[in-house]
Amino acid sequence: MIRIDSITTQTLSQNNSNNRENKQMDFAALLMEEAAKTATQSKETLEQDKSASGLDLSQAEQVVEQNAREELLRILQMSPAERIRYQMLQEMGLTEEALAAMPFEERMKIEAMIEEEIERQLAGGSKGPEGIQEIAQQGTTL
């Protein structure tokens, strides 16, 4: 038998708010990780192209920094659903253009998986980032 009183109710509401804060912190950590990856990849690309273009290192660093800043701002301006979609496509190794070029049935399967994940996360599902990776792995086996 379960006893519900004011202490139990307070404990449950505190647990729910802690879970929401953890999910938001998880997303913030993922976002910062993606921004750092993008910056690193851009810097590596520029260093490789530096000899061909003749840019001096400080100019290359400024370009990398600007590109990373623009990418971060673009991600921050996305709605939560757009961020989830962006993250899932990245996990699957796809872009919007690549998804649009896929055969209709395959694209619809991926769109359905993305929609399910968006609904799950926005409704407060419990899988978190691990759930996205599972779905991304399912998407790559289509």
Image: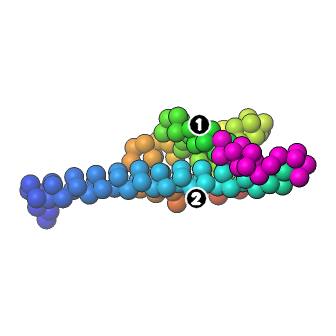
Residue at horizontal 60 percent and vertical 50 percent from the top:
35
Q: Secondary structure at mark 1?
A: helix
Residue corresponding to mark 1: 74
Q: Secondary structure at mark 2?
A: helix
In the depicted structure, whether residue 26 falls above or below residue 67: below
Residue 34 sits inside the magenta stretch: no
List the single residue furthest toward the bottom: 1
**Three-letter amino acid code of the residue under disc 1:** Arg
Query: Quarter of the image containing the N terminus?
Result: bottom left
Viewer-nearest residue: 89 or 116: 89
Q: Residues within 10 Å of mark 2 (few under 14, many from 20)?
A: few
Structural distance between the alpha carbons of marks 2 and 1: 26 Å
Residue at horizontal 14 percent and vertical 62 percent from the top:
2
Q: Quadrant of residue 111?
A: top right
Q: Is residue 15 left or right of residue 130?
A: left
Residue at horizontal 18 percent and vertical 59 percent from the top:
11
Colour style of the rendered protein structure: rainbow
Residue 58 sits inside the magenta stretch: yes
Q: Is residue 45 left or right of residue 19?
A: right
Residue 71, percent from left and from top:
62, 41
Q: Quadrant of residue 110?
A: top right
Residue at horizontal 66 percent and vertical 41 percent from the top:
66
Q: Main secondary structure of the magenta part?
A: helix
Residue range (magenta): 51-66
Residue 113, percent from left and from top:
58, 45
Residue 48, percent from left and from top:
84, 55
Residue corresponding to mark 2: 134
